[in-house]
Image (cartoon, coloured by chain):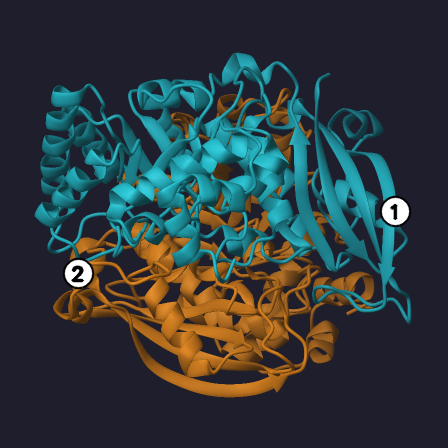
Chain colours: A orange, B cyan
Amino acid sequence: MERLKATYLIETPHNVEKAAAVLAGEQSSGTFVAVPGETDELKARFAARVEQIERLDEVPEPSLPGERVGNSAFTRARVTVSWSIENFGFNVPALMSTIQGNLYELRQFTGLKLDDFELPESYADHFKGPAFGLAGTKKLAGVEAGRPMIGTIIKPSVGLTPEYTADLVKTLAETGIDFVKDDELMTSTANSPFAVRVEKIMAVINDFAQKTGKKVMYAFNITGDLDTMKANYETVLNAGGMCAMVSINSVGWTGVKSICDWGALSIHGHRNGWGMLNRHPLLGINFPAYSKLWRLAGVDQLHVNGIKNKFWESDDSVVRSIKACLTPFLNNDAILPVVSSGQWGGQAFETYARTQTTELLYMAGGGIMAHPSGPEGGVRALRQAWTGAVDGYTLEETAAMYQEFGESVEKFGKGG
Amino acid sequence: MERLKATYLIETPHNVEKAAAVLAGEQSSGTFVAVPGETDELKARFAARVEQIERLDEVPEPSLPGERVGNSAFTRARVTVSWSIENFGFNVPALMSTIQGNLYELRQFTGLKLDDFELPESYADHFKGPAFGLAGTKKLAGVEAGRPMIGTIIKPSVGLTPEYTADLVKTLAETGIDFVKDDELMTSTANSPFAVRVEKIMAVINDFAQKTGKKVMYAFNITGDLDTMKANYETVLNAGGMCAMVSINSVGWTGVKSICDWGALSIHGHRNGWGMLNRHPLLGINFPAYSKLWRLAGVDQLHVNGIKNKFWESDDSVVRSIKACLTPFLNNDAILPVVSSGQWGGQAFETYARTQTTELLYMAGGGIMAHPSGPEGGVRALRQAWTGAVDGYTLEETAAMYQEFGESVEKFGKGG
């Protein structure tokens, strides 16, 4: 029978083999005393199995509150466990409860992080994956191969009126920008009701598209309960929009799945709350596993933070996340990595050097809006940075070659 | 204008006032440079506001990866921040993205945990809350006031056939048990399809109810995508069931809200995955805030772990969680605290001493099934433990007074 394999980073004061056995036992039998009815045959069919254990380092103090065993050190290891898919079939929330769930509660571990998982091919028959994915989203936005989509976020996050926002979008469209998004804090506010904002913004976008042939992709934040999201989705679609943004952690997997199933808009997955799930090195979930769950739901675009971001996340984690988005999964080639947070173009060089790709959405907020030559200069600078990076020039060389990027370096590059 | 207040436990190497201002700024303006359009008037209306700062201790090392400021110590504090509800209205996922969201990403903090939040009264007009809650669920299960509901979990978690499970439920019904549940790992498996399991189990339960007047509440695990949950919900309802269980973290807020809105079954909220959100003392969310989010969704019953549980959670956290469930919130008096994990009756004494309540669902797995006198003895022992505790006797006195509880102490009490 086909099996799901999940890999964890663990830390334990116990013998690693015994701890791994507890992990497998909790997630397939799950009680503290032997009970009748648990036959050997049944165990063989449904029990989780420890597939591999790779010992890593030892540390003197535990990473999380848990058990101590005398003066034992705490051993870290990479552990792979497998389950028959007979246990949960093609039910992803049940799968999540199996490979995550109570595992984090086990006192035998002083660290436990789900790193990645692999599904049998049969999953491809039950999950059609993202309706657009990377290629479909770029095509929808009319962005040619060989360069990233360039985007920005409306700031301040909340407070602007629909009219002011639409004016801003007009300014941005005229810069040649590919993508604009609501902030994750902005859904429907007292002075910017969702439907009014969509109407005003899409009037500008549709008008600009008619004049120039360039239709800016705007990610409207449809986040809400299911009825709200459905109504918002239809509002966007009816107005000629191409994209909806969802705060995936706040909405949750089943709600996001329902939205993605509608299939008419590219879904921009905003992962705010990610730090709660990932910030501790030995608790929660890493991006390879996390992104697969959302690809099963059908998300087309997923945030990955950015190189030298303003947040805590390391560049290594960002690079790994971009690569995860670009790795085929089931019948989907790639989803669009959304690079943002403190970006101004200066990071294009390292981003390209470490990922060798232009297949991403590269977003700057202040980096565009606060550019010395205005938003148009900001967008031009971002494109110049990527051209320079792809052509093999350094940041300094590119700054010398292109005026607007040179101005960006002057203004934003001094701390970087 | 009405405001939402959220309280956090934070840790920072910075001046606490400055760090709190960053927190408030990120969650209402959210960019790293000043931008046009952010007027003073707009800020006054939509900006988050730091309401209170209470300094706690200082520590030499950071709890989470983040910024260092020279050799500065890391200050811990309790910080209250408020937002106008104009920012998000009555949209709970947007509220979650506001009070959690990117906050966990801020490198200015080496610890950040949402502890609790308070909503304005107007929320009561938009959220009807749990359809049954504590009182409604106990009434539905026919459990009189003054004693806890007694329940158990079918074990092993996965692998049993519907026939075997139904036989087990028959045995359990005959013990006088109030409540039985699927394990969170058990949804629909190769050898126990959901609809068949419901049919077999409800036949037993309905039959027993007809004979005795006592209808056992069974929590069928309907967890899945929205279509699956809707179909499963209807299956349970049509078979005469009274309760559905949902793995709330795996399903997510909007999916759970949709289910609770159907309103015909008491919803048993299983919080597997909780450790991921809570195990680190300074990352994630504490139960008072967590439980309010699920009460807004309409969950009737919520897991709280148990005293001296087999997991990592402290007794203090368990007691605080029980009290949170029993505290009125908006127009709902209380939801049912679900006490479980390694329970066998011995913990009834401390549970009662510390909470002074019998208004809970007290669940034992092995504590019932592996009782020396069989499941009937196990259930009787649990009731005896609670009677003893409420009547003011000690564990030892109660063990001496009641045979079955005495046997429990013999078998399970030696390690406790």
Question: Numbered disc 1: what chain?
Answer: B
Question: Numbered disc 2: what chain?
Answer: A
Q: Which label is found at residue A86?
A: 2
Query: Which residue is rendered at x = 54% and y = 47% of the image?
Result: B307
Q: Is residue A158 visible?
A: no
Q: Is residue B325 above or below residue A130?
A: above
Q: Is residue B282 above or below residue B150?
A: below
Q: Position of residue B252 (x, y in %)?
A: 42, 41
Which residue is at the front of the view, A269 or A43? A43
Q: Position of residue A184 (x, y in %)?
A: 58, 41
Q: Identify the residue under disc 1.
A: B55
Query: Which residue is rendered at x = 48% and y = 23% of the image?
Result: A195
| Local crowd size for mark 2, using a 10 Å CA cut-off: few (<14), some (14–19), many (≥20) | many
Query: Which residue is rendered at x = 53% and y = 46% of the image?
Result: B396
Dividing the picture into quarters, in which one does residue A409 lie?
bottom right
Q: Secondary structure at mark 1?
A: strand
